[in-house]
Image (spheres, rainbow, N blue to C red):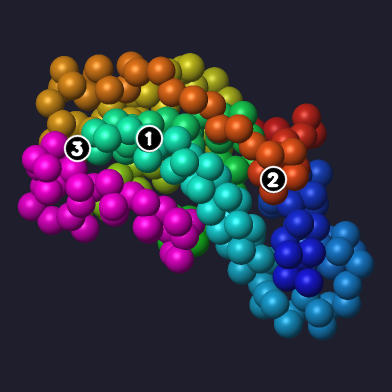
Amino acid sequence: MRMRLIESALHVFAEKGIDATDIKDVIEAAQVSRGSFYNYFQTNDELMGAVLQELGNELLALVDAVVTKRRDPAERVACGLRMVLRTASQHPLLARFVSRAGIHMVAGNSLAMQYLPRDIQTGLAQGHFHAQQPLAALTMTLGTAHAALCAMAMSDSLPADFPEEVAFQVLLGLGVRRAKARAVVSQAIEAVSLPADALLARTHSPTVTA
């Protein structure tokens, strides 16, 4: 039932937009009672947070399968960030979700809090990154990623290399030398290959506007 509500919310958000969606819209789409809805979610924002986590974890699992093929932690961080941002540019609803819900809903209990700390800790241990506090490095990286997604939600005319420039700035913030950071973000990366039944794939609709 929980997944039924999440999937129905995806379709409603895609059709009507986030701001125009009300709890009753989701209830009607899922064909459930209001009581059933409140067994799982208390507010529309709580439902949206669950949608974000499902979408985020699905996307990050696909990204990490590619990222872990790279040995250099700088390449891992930059590749992962670029893949996420490029996917968001193809699926504007993802960026709009993140912008509306805030970083705490995305980061809390998500795969981002498993994968990203792993690569940052490795980078620090191997001397690729330079930071006094690993938590500060993680906060900077997550915060920049969130700000980039917010920018994408607010504008449909960002430069094509926006993901690369964001990744470049993140690497500089982690202490990677400028020349290496530029070389890393210039490397070719794979596009995220979404299964046909993926939640994110089902939100891809020409009716969605930035």
Residue 157, percent across and down? 54, 20
Of marks 3 and 2, the one in the foreground: 2
**Above or below for 136 versus 90:** below
> Does residue 188 appear left or right of residue 180 in this picture?
right
> Crowding near pointer 3: few (<14 within 10 Å), some, many (20+)?
some
The quarter of the picture where residue 209 lies is top right
Along the viewing direction, whichever of 35 and 59 lies nearer the viewer: 59
> Crowding near pointer 2: few (<14 within 10 Å), some, many (20+)?
few
Total numbered labels: 3
Q: Amino acid at mark 1?
A: Lys
Whether residue 97 is visible to the viewer of this picture, yes or no, is: yes
Of callouts 3 and 1, which one flags the residue occurring earlier in the amino acid sequence? 1
Q: Residue at x 19, y 31 (%)?
A: 172
Circle 1 sits on which residue? 69
Residue 130, percent across and down? 10, 42
Whether residue 100 is visible to the viewer of this picture, yes or no, is: no
Q: Residue at x 60, y 43 (%)?
A: 94
C-beta proximity under 8 Å, tags 2 and 1: no
The quarter of the picture where residue 128 lies is top left
In the picture, the disc for residue 198 is: 2
Report the magenta residues as a range.
Answer: 106-135
Circle 3 sits on which residue? 173
Q: Say what secondary structure mark 2 lies in.
A: loop
> Crowding near pointer 1: few (<14 within 10 Å), some, many (20+)?
few
Q: Residue at x 69, y 48 (%)?
A: 199
> Does residue 13 appear left or right of residue 117 in this picture?
right
Of marks 2 and 1, the one in the foreground: 1
C-beta proximity under 8 Å, tags 3 and 2: no
